[in-house]
Amino acid sequence: MLEKYIEKKLVAEVKKMGGIAAKFVSPGLDGMPDRLVLLPYGKMAFVELKAPGKKPRLLQIRRIKQLQKLGFTCYVIDDVEQIGGILGEINNSL
């Protein structure tokens, strides 16, 4: 299974929930997560997508930790089976 397949599934599931999974591109700020998930009622999180079994690069890990230190929620998804649970967490967050 490719990362692209997982990404398509995430985008489709977010859309079903009435949200947006924006492709996040940040020129000049490397290592940012792939998607910014925006759900109804102001729920949001950054999501880094990986092929099954693959791990984020060191720069990506550092960027995720930086975002978390700023109070943002970040997830790494490497399996389509994780999508439902993670979207549930985002949706149920305060």
Image (cartoon, helix red, strand yellow):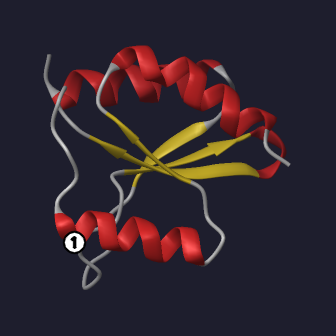
**Quadrant of res 91:** top right
Instruction: Please state the horizontal and vertical placement of residue 61, each as a whole percent of the image.
Output: 31, 64
Q: Is disc 1 surrounded by few (<14), some (14 to 19) or many (20+) residues within 10 Å?
A: few
**Residue lying furthest bottom in this view?**
28
The residue drawn where x is 79% and y is 43% is: 93
Q: Left or right of 33: which side holds 71?
A: right
Q: Amino acid at mark 1?
A: Leu
* Residue shown at 19% from the left, 26% from the top: 52
Which residue occupies the foreground of this view, 31 or 13?
Answer: 31
Q: Secondary structure at mark 1?
A: helix
The image shows residue 72 at horizontal and vertical percentages of 61, 65
Q: Is residue 94 left or right of residue 64?
A: right
Of 45 and 85, nearer the camera is 85
Q: Position of residue 25 (x, y in %)?
A: 32, 64
Q: Which residue is mark 1?
A: 59
Quarter containing the N terminus: top left
36 lies left or right of 9: right
Viewer-closest of 53 and 12: 53
Expressed as whole percent of the image width and height from the top left, the position of residue 60 reads 27, 64
Q: Is residue 6 above or below residue 19?
A: above
Q: Is residue 83 visible?
A: yes
